[in-house]
Amino acid sequence: MSDSTPTTGSSLVKRGLADMLKGGVIMDVVNVEQAKIAEDAGATAVMALERVPADIRAQGGVARMSDPDMIDEIIKAVNIPVMAKARIGHFVEAQILQTLGVDYIDESEVLSPADYVNHIDKWKFTVPFVCGATNLGEALRRITEGAAMIRSKGEAGTGDVSEATKHIRTINREIAALRYLSPDELYVAAKDLQAPYDVVKEVAETGKLPVVLFTAGGVATPADAALMMQLGADGVFVGSGIFKSGNPAQRAAAIVKATTFYDDAQVVADASRGLGEAMVGINVSDLAAPHRLAERGW
Amino acid sequence: MRIGVLGLQGDFREHLAVMSTLGAEAITVRREAELASIDGLIIPGGESSVMDKLSRTFGLAEPLKAAVASGLPVYGTCAGLIMLADTILDGMAGQQTIGGLDVSVRRNAFGSQRDSFEEDLDVPVLDGGQVHAVFIRAPVVESVGPSATPLGTLRDGRVVAVEQGNLLGTSFHPEMTHDYRFHEYFLAKARARAAG
């Protein structure tokens, strides 16, 4: 028998869980009942939070990490991985979430930032982190800080998918652009992206991020989810879109089907039938700049 | 040699890439018709409860059982091992499996993600013997029935790799470590069957 001891918290293990979530839907839930509905509908993971983004938006105030009791209850209630959100830069909230045994921490712009300069040093944690990004440079800065998974930000809590579309297209376009650069041009590309040269070079060589890329923010229908997948997302986060709709259980299951068969219009069409009211939504263009969550984080 | 990878959810693209690297024609399987044309099937890592649900919703569960019963070589990693187990412990209420492996598998046997780990194992049937294995919210083979054979164990003796005829299952993810010996071992079964 070999003499190696088990290693926890390695990049392979952290990034690996995100690989297992691929092709799936991660759903925001605020209580045990919603978590069970999400699990029954085929969610690959749930995101436990106190208020979905649409309510954070409507109610205002400072949005923080959820109550540990509520997170505990959700961890006990479901078998699938449980994620939870910490404020940007709030490493103590992250320490608490790791202690609670959540499977992934989302350092999220949906909550009120705790630090307007620094993000969390995510290398210090055994639990993996997912972070939002609106473009490639932001994604690579988060990966440099230790993020094991990236989600394009979109504009959470709106039901307007246009920002999610913009962000995934931007990230993919910027990756594609790197492929055409000669090695000596990558130094300037790294400067322009405000990201370390080594990781920029890696992306230029492989043509993809070194971690899994999901998309988030404004996904409300099966067609939205399939759109994200066709645009190259590895999977989708659905926040307010499910539990702010008329028939959450049915809509959740429909979004799961559309995510798996994203390239089959017949399946997506069938999944889109009879779902009742989608969340009402807000057009991102009607949001005043201070209320645009995607602009939090840098 | 055409190998299908069940593509309902999970890291199926990694398995497709390994199969292509090893010279097999690799196709994604999401429908019954795609099952008919393949010489072997890989069930990837992912969420076993999601794969179970989608396979039943889209009419794939029964054809998968029939394929296993007919002797199709099938390799399951992590969630795929769960799908191949005759008995599942700690599954979701109502969770079903394709079955075929005479084993009981405990889902998510090591705890939450912070307990996920890498460890070296001895797997005597493979060339070189030792495997660096990655366990991610992994299942463990809790009991092995008389028809199945353990291939690898953790240092505490728990079984994490098993085979039975044309079926092969691992709790861990060789597709993530660029170690293709398990995939080659599986391909040998597929080749032997195709040769009749």
Image: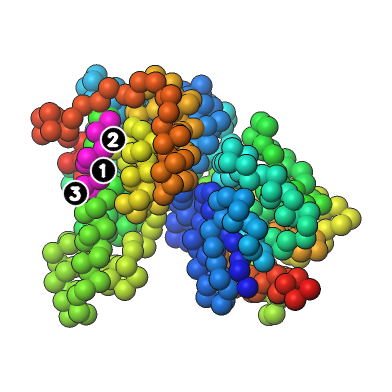
Q: Left or right of A218: which side holds B76?
A: right
Question: SS for tag 2?
Answer: loop
**Image disc number at residue A218:** 2
- Asked if disc 2 and disc 1 are in contact, CB closer than 8 Å, the reply is yes
Question: SS for tag 1?
Answer: helix
**Percent position of residue B63, x then y:** 69, 48
Q: Earlier in the sequence, mark 1 or mark 3?
A: 1
Q: Residues within 10 Å of mark 3 (few under 14, many from 20)?
A: some
Q: Chain of mark 3?
A: A
For disc 1, the marked residue is: A164
Q: Identify the residue at horizontal 52%, vertical 72% (top origin).
A: B20
Vertical order, A181 against A265 (above or below): below
**Percent position of residue A140, x then y:** 27, 59
Q: Chain of mark 2?
A: A
**Image disc number at residue A298:** 3
Q: Left or right of A282: which side holds A9?
A: right
**Residue B117 part of the magenta segment:** no
Q: Which residues are magenta?
A: A159-167
The kind of residue on which mark 3 rests is Trp
| Image quadrant occupied by the N terminus of chain A | bottom right
Of residue A106 and residue A96, the one placed in the foreground of this image is A106
